[in-house]
Image: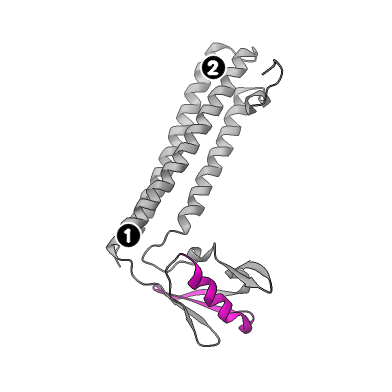
């Protein structure tokens, strides 16, 4: 690569604060992404977030369940969906049946009822495995962001925008920030794991 052909994000920062703010914003996104991904992991309790990724073919447009009906949890092991348009009831049922949630909905012409069966021990272990795999992917993302931030700090030194003392302090800060986000991630995963393993 010829000089001046800086293609990495490292070239866009003028100060350590810029680097830290950028890294923090990206780490926040990773944490938010994990929360979203974990919301579709089933626990033994009924939860509306389970259905977030299900789309219903509503007059040729794949639409979220919440756009085609009212979702409700009348009891801990039951979810009901009342369609806004009762002609769509079979399509709603079909979309749930076709998802990988392993649920068995039924309808009475007005309401779709989805019993949430208790998870078997085998299924709980699978869910926990999936959860740990998900957490590791997000941990790797956080470490990659630490690496990018460190490179950006080194670039500031190279461009003589900060001193070597500033660099040491900045690298230390980036490490502390990464550790804090990994800890937040671990706490969130532990809470979710407890929900999955909890037998009601």
Badge 2: residue crowd in 10 Å (few <14, some 14–19, many ≥20): some
Residue 195 in percent (x, y) is at 36, 59
Residue, far bottom:
109
Mark 1 vs mark 2, CA separation in Å: 46 Å
Say the numbered circle drawn on residue 8.
none
Quadrant that contains the C terminus: bottom left
Q: Quadrant of residue 119?
A: bottom left
For the residue pair 28 and 111, the one nearer the viewer reads as 111
Residue 78 included in the magenta stretch of the image: yes
Say if 190 sits above or below 142 in the image.
Answer: below
Say if 143 sits above or below 135 in the image.
Answer: above
Say if 14 sits above or below 135 in the image.
Answer: above
Quadrant that contains the N terminus: top right
Say the numbered circle drawn on residue 167.
2
Residue 155 in percent (x, y) is at 61, 18
The residue singled out by tag 1 in the image is 124
Magenta segment range?
72-100
Between label 1 and label 2, give the one nearer the viewer.
1
For the residue pair 119 and 182, the one nearer the viewer reads as 119
Numbered marks: total: 2
Residue located at (56% from left, 80% from top): 90
Residue 51 in percent (x, y) is at 51, 66
Residue located at (64% from left, 27% from top): 8
Residue 23 included in the magenta stretch of the image: no
Circle 2: element type: helix
Residue located at (43% from left, 38% from top): 182
Circle 1: element type: helix
| Tag 1 and tag 2, C-beta contact below 8 Å | no
Lower position in the chain sequence, tag 1 or tag 2: 1
């Amino acid at each position: 690569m010829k000089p001046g052909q800086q293609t990495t994000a490292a070239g866009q920062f003028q100060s350590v604060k810029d680097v830290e703010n950028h890294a923090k914003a990206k780490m926040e996104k990773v944490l938010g992404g994990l929360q979203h991904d974990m919301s579709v992991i089933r626990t033994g309790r009924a939860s509306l977030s389970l259905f977030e990724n299900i789309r219903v073919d509503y007059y040729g447009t794949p639409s979220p369940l919440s756009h085609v009906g009212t979702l409700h949890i009348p009891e801990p092991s039951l979810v009901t969906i009342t369609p806004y348009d009762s002609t769509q009831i079979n399509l709603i049922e079909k979309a749930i049946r076709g998802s990988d949630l392993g649920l068995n909905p039924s309808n009475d012409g007005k309401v779709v009822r989805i019993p949430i069966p208790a998870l078997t021990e085998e299924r709980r272990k699978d869910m926990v495995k999936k959860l740990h795999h998900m957490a590791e992917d997000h941990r790797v993302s956080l470490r990659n962001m630490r690496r990018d931030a460190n490179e950006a700090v080194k670039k500031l030194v190279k461009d003589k925008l900060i001193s070597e003392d500033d660099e040491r302090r900045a690298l230390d800060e980036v490490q502390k920030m990464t550790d804090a986000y990994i800890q937040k991630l671990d706490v969130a995963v532990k809470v979710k794991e407890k929900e999955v393993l909890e037998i009601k």
